[in-house]
Amino acid sequence: MDCRGGKRGREKGQRKDRDVHLSKAMSYALRHGAKQLGLQMSTDGFLFVEDLLAHPQFCSYTVEDVERVVATNDKQRFKLRSHPENGRLQIRANQGHSIQVTDLELRPVLAGSADCPAEAVHGTYLRNWPSIQQHGLSRMNRTHIHLAPGLPGEDGIISGMRKNCDLAVFIDVPMALADGIEFFRSENGVYLTAGNAEGKLLPKYFIRTLRLRPTRSVLPFL
């Protein structure tokens, strides 16, 4: 056995684990915990990378680590930019916030427009189905309900639901729009909605529900 090859393999695995840890830590900081961590976030959700890396939780990482995690994230969760005035590197999460962010550069979905989808799908878990079936989807403590343009593995679908979801709920977007519910599309192709006044998408907007595992099968509504 080539000892050098084994060492390279271990180092590659260690770096992957390290990148996963950094990605999860950034997701928490950028979506939920900036204030608790004492990090200053702008109204559009950006933090200065140097401020992030100065925090004790991130001080073992480098700018190169952050850039690599952003570039290789399969769901494109993050965005890097140079500050328009001073050029300092900034980062934000594209969606998934529980903290209020006023300007995520979300594009409104307009009824009747060419890019208005006939349906969008929310990924969840079978254990939640009895409640969802009765009360609808809820944004819970987040600012939006997340929906994908299709199921994981389909062409062009990179984000919108967790890979381990075992239930997919398909939403009639035009019908919800007609009732005054707003939808937006994020930079990485996820559809977002705050739902109705109670933060919900009611069951009347469900087109179908699909069990994803162990085999795919349609679930009845009643």
Image (cartoon, rainbow, N blue to C red):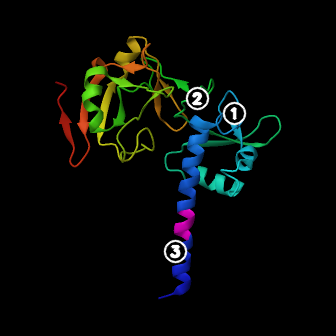
Measured Cα–Cα span from mark 2 to mark 1: 10 Å
> In the image, which disc is placed on residue 99?
2
- Whether the magenta-drawn stretch holds residue 212 is answered as no
Residue at numbered disc 3: 9
Query: Which of the 4 quarters of the picture holds residue 172?
Result: top left
Describe residue 123's horizontal placement relative to residue 114 as left or right. left
Name the main secondary structure of what is drawn in magenta: helix
Outermost residue, bottom side: 1
SS for callout 2: loop
* Kind of residue sitting beneath label 3: Gly
Q: Earlier in the sequence, mark 2 or mark 1?
A: 1
Q: Are marks 3 and 1 in contact (CB under 8 Å)?
A: no
Q: Residue 59 location in percent, x, y?
A: 71, 54
SS for callout 3: helix
Q: Residue 127 or 177: which is nearer the viewer?
A: 127
Residue drawn at point x = 35 percent, y = 32 percent: 121
